[in-house]
Image (tube, coloured by chain):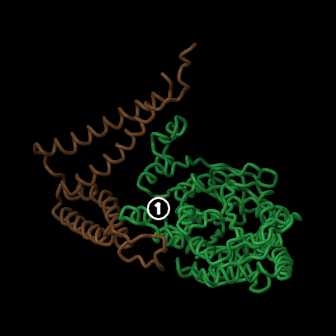
Chain colours: A brown, B green
Amino acid sequence: MPRAKIYGYLAIIVSLAAAFAFLYFGFYDTIIGRPIPSSASYYAIAIPIGVVTLAVLVTGFWIGWTILTIQVVKPMPEIVEKKDYAKAKAFLLCLATLALAALFAYGLYLQSFWALAVPAAVITLVILGMVFWVGIAIITTRNTLPADKNS
Amino acid sequence: MRALFLCYRGNPFCGGQGIYLYHLTRELAALGVEIDVIVGPPYPDPLEGWADVYKTENLNIWSIRTRHFGPDKLQRVLSPWNFVDYFLTRMHVFGEMETFSGRAFFKLRDLLRTRRYDIIHDVQCLGWGLVPMRGYGIPIVTTVHHPLTRDREADFTHDKSFWELMTTVLFYPLTMQRFVINRLDRVITSSTEGAEELGRAFGVRRDRISVVYNGMDVEMFRNDGSEREPDTLLFVGNTEDHKKGLIYLFEAMTLLPERITLTIVDEGPPVRTSAFNMIKRFGIEDRVRFTGKVSLDRLVNLYSSKAVLVMSSLYEGFGLPAAEAMACETPVVVTAVGSLPEVVAHNETGLIVPPENPRALADAIMMVLKDKKLQRSMGKKGRMRTVENFAWPVAAQNTLAVYEDVIRAYRRAS
């Protein structure tokens, strides 16, 4: 098997195994009653996850805020009337990110397991999903010319 | 003096940064500066004659779907920096500047084991990696022709949906650039207007900005002796760039006599359709022609044979086509935006009109077209102006003066 395909299969296997391990040990184990760790242990995990989560939420808020406050000189004459309700959607994005940030902060205050688990799951699964997708692309991409049917 | 250039895209045939890198390093080397270059793809193959080139990797996967990467890129995407780039591009972030500056930071660490530099010259990257790079104890200058805020604003004027607006916000790394530019030792920009713009966009203090006019190859761009075709206009530039204000030029065409034609040096349909759609709407298809991509010789020939170069821009960082046309003794009609009023001398080498005003554009074009004597006089003065102000040797001398000033100030402070 060509080396490229091996990398592809490895990417798929590693990402699937890591996703399974993450979901099993991170969620299933906890659901069946494993105790929440001590306060220091909790915040050791909470701080890095919190930084990344808040960075994502702040980025979302910033996107919404930028769209809400765009002051474009004047729409180009060739642009037809914008009908996408972009400002309303931007407002909703700001609202949603603020609400999620507040919920997340409240969860941290309560030392909730889920306040860490949900964002960690989203971040981890997005990255593993990308590795998985690269693996799929590698093994399904033709890297040699098709065989000549006449020969 | 030994200078290290950082350029995330280095090929002179792929854009302004590559052209700037190629000519400026060559002229600086001629002035005795030893040049090293850390550069990303597409690479500047011909630099080796006067500079040591260190290439960094980049997959250039922006706007390419994963399944279309091809086997080579797919294998390489799983390495750490490439995966960061992959992650960012999938999130609609243009990550090339971030990853290039990171790679350059580590590359420089390796180079400093055997080399010493007096100055680092970043070419329009302003990536995060420049901030820790200051820890190497070498002054860093950057060249920024215009802040990306202008490009983003131009994109906003065309974005129709929330999704388009959101991806535009994500695409431009303005937060990074604002943070980094204010931590470098000097910013070089190509016009006084550009300096003001940098202040407005990124809050850069005026005393930390040096204006060095862009250079151009005045030997290559000189009149080739072709006969001038009467009643012909020329536009050179990216027709997909909304900052070019092409709609105003097309509207001006409708106000001009039918015999006047326009040649556009860029791809037309089916490759690029925005301009052609506007042309159809104005009903001037018979009077406008696209050349597609042309060789430098052909470009010089077009500059030399068309009667007037027109730029209807809403903003210009420098306005290179105006300078190139002037070098070929062609009068220009341009809008009073960005640095164009500094490049073009009003009533001397061309005419400057207000932007977004098709009537003023048409009147100015007619004034030049109907007066052959004025055309010749403007052409001669244009050539003289470009040779004195915009030749690469002049740009290199002025850049070297900035280097010396920055190094002096840096050593005094440390």
Q: Amino acid at mark 1?
A: Phe
Residue extending farthest to the front is B258
Instruction: Please state which of residues B114 and B34 is positioned toward the viewer in this rendering.
Output: B34
Q: Is residue B65 left or right of residue B345?
A: left
Return the x and y of residue B327 as percentages of the image width and height.
Answer: 81, 71
Return the x and y of residue B165 as percentages of the image width and height.
Answer: 40, 66
Return the x and y of residue B334 as percentages of the image width and height.
Answer: 68, 78
Q: Is residue B9 above or below residue B303?
A: above
Q: Say which residue appears at 76% left-offset and 60% top-offset.
A: B299
**Residue marked by disc 1:** B171
Q: Is residue B54 visible?
A: yes
Q: Quadrant of residue A147?
A: top right
Q: Is residue B17 visible?
A: no
Q: Say which residue appears at 84% left-offset and 64% top-offset.
A: B32
Return the x and y of residue B365 as percentages of the image width and height.
Answer: 71, 79
Q: Is residue A29 above or below residue B260?
A: above
Q: Quadrant of residue B309?
A: bottom right
Q: Say which residue appears at 58% left-offset and 13% top-offset.
A: A151
Q: Is residue B362 above or below residue B270?
A: below
Total of numbered circles in the picture? 1
Residue extending farthest to the top is A151
Q: Is residue B3 left or right of residue B69?
A: right
Mark 1, secondary structure of its residue: helix
Instruction: Please state which of residues B304 and B102 is positioned toward the viewer in this rendering.
Output: B304
Q: Quadrant of residue A40?
A: bottom left
Instruction: Please state which of residues B141 and B268 is positioned toward the viewer in this rendering.
Output: B268
Q: Classify mark 1: residues with Cα within 10 Å, few (<14), some (14-19) or many (20+).
A: some
Residue extending farthest to the right is B225
Residue extending farthest to the bottom is B347
Disc 1 is attached to a residue of which chain?
Answer: B
